[in-house]
Image (cartoon, grey):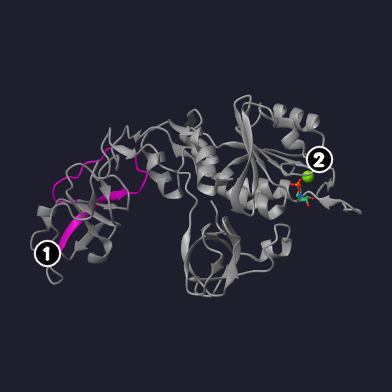
């Protein structure tokens, strides 16, 4: 039997990021969540031109010397400069332009007087305060200079990265693609979702659940399909999927029963191993490659499948995506005692107390208990050496909401 950590390291050992792709920044909505494979450098200055930070009047500051509310300076207004004005304008000494936020500063102006310090005049304006040169200006290049690195390699693109990415004059960026994950549920007992399960049958809930987990973790779902208990049919399905997926997940058919199609299909292959892992749930596990594509053979009980996906498949798929494999956890204190099997690392379904700092177990911990799974909010990690989980003890827990 392998410890959980040993097995996790084993399945991660050969994982490498997928080959990077160049993608147009114009499709940025589809790039969110992807990781940059190379740094992004700006080809332009930001701001691209010196512009007004306020609605007001573009002036030569020396013209306003001595202006006060009682002795305002009155200047003729040459016209309006709205945002988006592409003219190259000049300021004649002793005059001003009415200017809007983001509009280009006319040559010769060195400050903007905000409209609140004026009477807002259109033909001529009374300016009630002297302002120093540089007031209310955004200077060309003060934010970003041409050649500046605006996003380092390894950035996972989030909405906050969009403005600089789209504004830096870059047409394409290099990113690691989203891993395409294919799911195959096995078992002659399975019926398609939406169909009634007769005596001896169950609805295939693992396939859609694993597909949903893959999507929520930020991967593409290449296929969700079912195979019965024929090892030949399973092998053919997996081989076909290697052309469409970067990672394949099977569920069921890996334990010690008589009809274990995944085990039968891959046992004896040099590129595959079936092991017992000291974890609960999820003890029987298989991992290997088929035509170079990693294949995770997960146990079929729904809870075991979910836990195995989050702790083994998702970390490996994150590496393919250029991301950190680590499973995010938080700390919580135990509010109610429970037991854990000797010698196995337990991933116990728990709920949080109201303040989110304490956890208590939920329902039966059996791997087939679907109601308890739905009601759980996190998986508490109980070390292999612990059999009595005591009140007040601190554990690391994996929140199940917001996996992305
Ligand atoms: P297995 O690992 O194939 O022995 O399956 C273990 C248990 O999980 C059995 O009770 C199966 O019926 C159930 N099971 C296996 N695959 C699925 C699935 N895709 N959806 C729901 N239950 C499943
Ligand atoms: Mg089965």
Q: How crowded is mark 2: few (under 14 residues within 10 Å), some or many (20 or more)?
A: some
Quadrant including the N terminus? top right
Residue 271 falls in image quadrant: top right
Q: Which of 194 and 302 is in front in this view?
A: 302
Mark 1 or 2: in front is: 2
Q: Which mark is residue 67?
A: 1
Q: Residue furthest left?
A: 66
1 w.r.t. 355: above or below: above
For the point 29% across and 52% down, which residue is it? 99
For the point 49% across and 35% down, which residue is it? 13
> Can residue 194 be seen from the camera position used here?
no
Q: Name the residue under label 2.
A: 259
Query: Relative to residue 333, is residue 60 drawn left or right?
Result: left
Q: Nearer the viewer, residue 16 or 280?
A: 280
Is 14 covered by the magenta stretch?
no
215 w.r.t. 41: above or below: below
- Secondary element under disc 1, as helix, strand or loop, is loop
Instruction: Return the x and y of residue 207 as percentages of the image width and height.
Output: 72, 46
Query: Relative to residue 182, is residue 310 drawn left or right?
Result: left
Q: Which of 335 and 224 is in front in this view?
A: 335
Query: Magenta segment, which residues?
Result: 72-95
- Secondary element under disc 2, as helix, strand or loop, is loop
């Amino acid at each position: 039997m392998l410890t959980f950590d040993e097995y996790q390291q084993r399945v991660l050992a050969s994982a490498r990021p997928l080959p990077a792709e160049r993608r147009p920044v114009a499709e940025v909505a589809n790039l969110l969540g992807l990781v940059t494979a190379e740094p992004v450098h700006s080809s332009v200055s930001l701001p691209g031109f010196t512009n007004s930070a306020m609605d007001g009047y573009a002036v030569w500051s020396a013209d306003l010397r001595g202006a006060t509310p009682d002795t305002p300076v009155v200047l003729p207004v040459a016209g309006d400069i709205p945002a988006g004005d592409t003219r190259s304008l000049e300021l004649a000494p002793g005059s001003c332009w009415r200017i809007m936020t983001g509009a280009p500063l006319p040559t010769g102006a060195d400050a903007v007087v905000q409209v609140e310090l004026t009477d807002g005049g259109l033909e001529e304006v009374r300016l009630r305060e002297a302002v120093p040169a540089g007031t209310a200006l955004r200077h060309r290049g003060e934010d970003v200079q041409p050649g500046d690195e605006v996003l380092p390699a390894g950035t996972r693109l989030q909405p906050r990265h969009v403005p600089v990415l789209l504004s830096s004059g870059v047409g394409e960026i290099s990113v690691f693609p989203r891993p395409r994950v294919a799911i195959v549920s096995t078992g002659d007992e399975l019926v398609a979702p939406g169909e009634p399960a007769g005596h001896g049958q169950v609805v295939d809930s693992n396939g859609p659940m694993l597909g949903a987990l893959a999507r929520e973790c930020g991967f593409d779902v290449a296929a969700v399909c079912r195979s019965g208990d024929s090892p030949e049919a399973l092998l053919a399905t997996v081989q076909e999927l290697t052309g469409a997926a970067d990672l394949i997940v099977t569920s069921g058919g890996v334990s010690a029963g008589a009809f274990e199609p995944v085990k039968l299909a891959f046992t004896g292959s040099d590129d595959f191993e079936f092991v017992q892992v000291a974890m609960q749930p999820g003890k029987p596990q298989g991992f290997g490659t088929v035509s170079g594509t990693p294949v995770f053979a997960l146990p079929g009980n729904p809870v075991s499948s979910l836990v195995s996906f989050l702790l083994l498949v998702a970390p490996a798929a994150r590496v393919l995506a250029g991301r950190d494999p680590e499973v995010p956890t938080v700390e919580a204190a135990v509010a109610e005692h429970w037991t854990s099997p000797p010698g196995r690392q337990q991933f116990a379904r728990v709920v949080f107390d109201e303040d989110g700092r304490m956890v208590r177990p939920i329902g039966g911990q059996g791997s087939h208990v679907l109601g308890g799974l739905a009601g759980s909010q996190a998986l508490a990690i109980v070390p292999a050496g612990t059999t009595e989980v005591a009140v007040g003890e601190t554990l690391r827990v994996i929140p199940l909401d917001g996996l992305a």
